[in-house]
Image: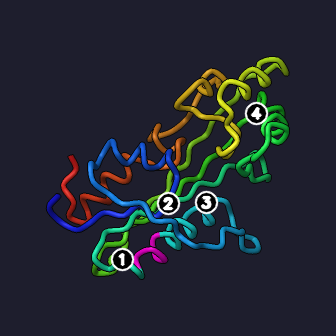
Amino acid sequence: MTGPRIVLASTSRYRAALLRRLLDDFEQIAPDVDERSLPDETPAARASRLAAAKASVVSENRRDALVIGSDQVATLGNNILHKPGSTGNASHQLRASSGNHVDFFTGLCVIDGQGSRHAALDHTRVLFRKLTDAEIDRYIARERPLDCAGSFKSEGTGIALFERIETTDPSALVGLPLIALARLLRQAGIAVP
């Protein structure tokens, strides 16, 4: 590969799979970042702050590389939907989301070897259809979305849970907005495609 090394500041297999759609060669490094919300921080501000923090932490040790940081915050009304971690929590989240809108704010930050930053924020809104308990149970048993904010995988069977998705970038819902990332990479001097 010509040009700088590319590092994804994430160990997410979902983000890595998305990034492979744009780039063949990159590393993944886990960022050590405190992901708690700050007082009075909006979900959009939190996603942007954490994306920048992840990229910054990794960039400190990899000044030879272009580093990509991303973070996503899912909200149902005023409540943040974290990764459920258990089938019980996933069931609770999907029951609460049934018939409602869930908002996803995905922050993105690219830092090059000179320390220049390029950032973007995506807002995707999902309208869940009314779900029965049996549909929720079948879905969780089939996909086991326990490591996904909102308790679904839109790239899989989770797409059947929705009435509609309102977005400018369908990849953002999975956790890495590729349209914005391609633009930021070009701004940083990386040829895409």
Please tell me whether mark 1 sits on a helix, a strand or a loop: loop
Question: Mark 4, residues whose alpha carbon is within 10 Å: few (<14), some, or many (≥20)?
Answer: some
Residue 47 drawn above or below residue 56 = above
Which is more N-terminal, label 1 or label 4?
1
Q: Would you say 104 lies left or right of 181 here?
A: right
Discs 4, 3 touching: Cβ within 8 Å: no
Q: Residue at label 2?
A: 10
User: Distance from label 4 to label 1 (Cα)?
Assistant: 42 Å
The quarter of the displayed image where residue 131 is located:
top right
> What's the magenta region?
55-59
Which is more N-terminal, label 3 or label 4?
3
Kindly identify the amino acid type of the residue bearing the numbered disc 4: Asn
Magenta span: predominant SS is helix
The quarter of the displayed image where residue 43 is located:
bottom right
User: Distance from label 1 to label 3 (Cα)?
Assistant: 27 Å
Q: Residue at label 4?
A: 100
**Front position in the image: 48 or 58:** 58
Q: Position of residue 7 (x, y in %)?
A: 36, 64
Please tell me whether mark 3 sits on a helix, a strand or a loop: helix
Kindly identify the amino acid type of the residue bearing the numbered disc 3: Ala
Disc number placed over residue 44 in the picture, else none:
3
Closer to the eye: label 4 or 1? 1
Q: Position of residue 169 (x, y in %)?
A: 44, 41
Which is more N-terminal, label 1 or label 2?
2
Residue 103 drawn above or below residue 183 = above
Q: Position of residue 101 (x, y in %)?
A: 71, 37
Question: Mark 2, residues whose alpha carbon is within 10 Å: few (<14), some, or many (≥20)?
Answer: many
**Front position in the image: 34 or 85:** 85
Disc number placed over residue 62 in the picture, else none:
1
Is residue 13 part of the magenta span, yes or no? no
Which is more N-terminal, label 3 or label 1?
3
